[in-house]
Image (cartoon, rainbow, N blue to C red):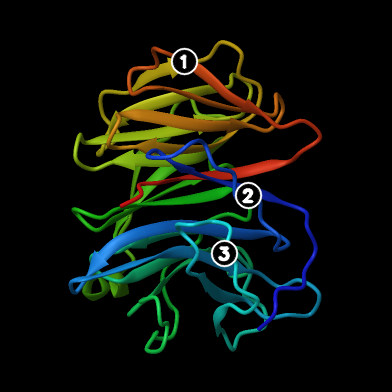
Amino acid sequence: MNIDVNINCARLVIDSNMDLTFVLCTVAALSVYANSQYMNGTEEKGLIFTARNTRGTRAALWHLPTMPPYDEVPETVTIVPFNDRFLQFYSLDVDFRKKIVYIYDRHYRSLLAVENYTASMDNIAREKPFHLGVSTGTVQIAVDWLSHTIYWTDSTYRWIAAAPGAIEKMDNDIYKIIADTNLYHPDGMTLDPLDGFLFWTDSGLYPKIERSDMAGRDRKTLITKGLISPISLETDIANKRIYWIDTATENIESSKYDGTDRLTLKRITLSTLFDSRNFQGK
């Protein structure tokens, strides 16, 4: 399937072993996850796109095996379509150990799990709803690939919640609200399962970046100064840094896990930045 769509969003991938690299989306209103992991002894790497209903097309998963290098973009992309024409994919993350893609679908206000994800995308199962009742606001997903827990922000309900990501537990629709005080518009989310940290942005009345443990305890406000609309967040686990995008200042910034050593990496003027992901090159 040839890529032939509008350019109206931008996503960022950061390679910590190379110079800062920008991957600007050429797909209207999509989510992307950068992945480079070993599965069954074979390294699988690439970008996973979720294209939502635009220009009459159905929602789909796209796999673009172009990382690294970034400049060898193929003319065709492996695609897995979904039969339901109402699905609208807005956010995703991947549990590479379980080979599951987790997706936020705005139309049905649900979180979905898609099993058997591999680079070939030749044996992917049907989407399985595992939580109904998220809002139609801003919802971002983050996966703890050690405990297989799914976290998400919800800007309308103004909370951060978590649910077990194991397929055998999904029928029970168990979830827990882990933070819901002093939140105005929680947006971007990322985590470091190894150090046990959960990070999120709040682009509401008092913009800030916060950190807690994986259960939402021991909350700390890391950064407030100079923030206007921080809407995305990502961790560099190897170097213990966080990266974020502020769509109002048009800045891509970074700091250590404790909020110190703050750096402005890039300002992209006349742009609308939506999300960022960190890529650890092999």
Q: Nearer the viewer, mark 2 or mark 3?
A: 3
**For this view, does 240 lie left or right of residue 67?**
left
Residue lying at 30% horizontally and 30% vertically, measured from the top left: 239
- Amino acid on which the number 1 mark rests in the picture: Arg
Q: Where residue 83 appears, x then y in whole percent?
A: 59, 89
Mark 1 vs mark 3, CA separation in Å: 33 Å
On the question of residue 156 being in view, the answer is no
Circle 3 residue: 72
The N terminus lies in quadrant: bottom right
Residue lying at 57% horizontally and 42% vertically, measured from the top left: 155
Q: Nearer the viewer, mark 1 or mark 2?
A: 1
**Sequence order check: which comes first, mark 2 or mark 3?**
3
Q: Residues within 10 Å of mark 3 (few under 14, many from 20)?
A: few
Q: Quadrant of residue 75?
A: bottom right
Q: Work out whether residue 173 or residue 148 is closer to the camera in this orientation and state it.
A: 148
- Amino acid on which the number 2 mark rests in the picture: Gly
Circle 1 residue: 262
Residue lying at 19% horizontally and 40% vertically, measured from the top left: 194
Q: Where residue 13 appears, x then y in whole percent?
A: 51, 46
**Sequence order check: which comes first, mark 1 or mark 3?**
3
Say if 139 sits above or below 199 in the image.
Answer: below
Q: Work out whether residue 128 or residue 263 is closer to the camera in this orientation and state it.
A: 263
Which element is circle 2 on?
A: loop
Say if 68 sits above or below 273 in the image.
Answer: below
**For this view, does 235 lie left or right of residue 7?**
left
Which element is circle 1 on?
A: loop
Which element is circle 3 on?
A: loop
Residue lying at 39% horizontally and 86% vertically, measured from the top left: 125
Q: Work out whether residue 108 or residue 144 is closer to the camera in this orientation and state it.
A: 144
